[in-house]
Image: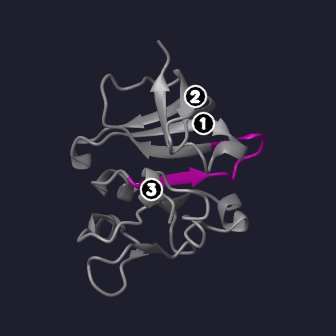
Amino acid sequence: MSYRNDGVLSESDLAGRLPSEERMRRGPVVIMECVERIPCNPCVTACPRGAITIEGDINDTPSVDFEECNGCGLCIAACPGLAVFVVDASGEGDTATVKLPYEYTPLPVVGDQVKALDRAGREVGPARVKRVVNTRAMDRTPVVELEVPRNQALKVRHFIQRS
């Protein structure tokens, strides 16, 4: 896998880990970008539907039953590796939403225009902050929902606030 060389997952690294386009059109669904074999399972315990599992021992990587996942996003803040995202490409028009963990201050504000970044930190275009969730139960890991161009929903994994 190419991420071992530069720390960035490639599209081929994600092959077999993404929901089908048909599933993505039906509503929000989790994208697990956890590829490291480490002893970790908070995403499994956070999922109320049992859609996330780890087969074998706790060092194996999680897998998702995309048909069982409803995209609630409880697994996002639970992941200490910041490797969980929820994509919703079900709406009409040219936009989709991406929910992602955000551990920086200041938190963005709903309506803010931000610069969407890909896995390598490269700017991929503009995004709009649609929602910010930061509850006590999330253990200080806010989840930010971005509205992005639909064709970038599988690329956007972070953002920077405009100065």
Residue appearing at x 50%, y 42% in the figure: 120
What residue is drawn where x is 31% and y is 56%?
Answer: 79
Residue marked by disc 2: 128
Percent coordinates x, y for residue 15 in the rendering: 60, 69
Q: Are marks 1 and 2 in contact (CB under 8 Å)?
A: yes
Q: Callout 3 environment at 10 Å: few (<14), some (14 to 19), or many (20+)?
A: few
Can you give x and y, in whole percent of width and height, for residue 158 in the image?
A: 47, 38
Please tell me which residue is depicted at 55% across the width and 34% down the height of the picture.
122
Identify the residue position indicated by label 1 in the image.
Answer: 147
Q: Which mark is residue 8?
A: none
The tag earlier along the polypeptide, 1 or 2, is 2
Cα distance in 3D space between marks 2 and 3:
32 Å
Which secondary structure lies at badge 2?
A: strand
Which amino acid lies under the numbered mark 3 shown in the image of this protein?
Asn
Counting the numbered discs, the total is: 3
Magenta highlight range: 83-96
Find numbered disc 1 in the image and state the secondary structure of the residue it sits on.
Answer: strand
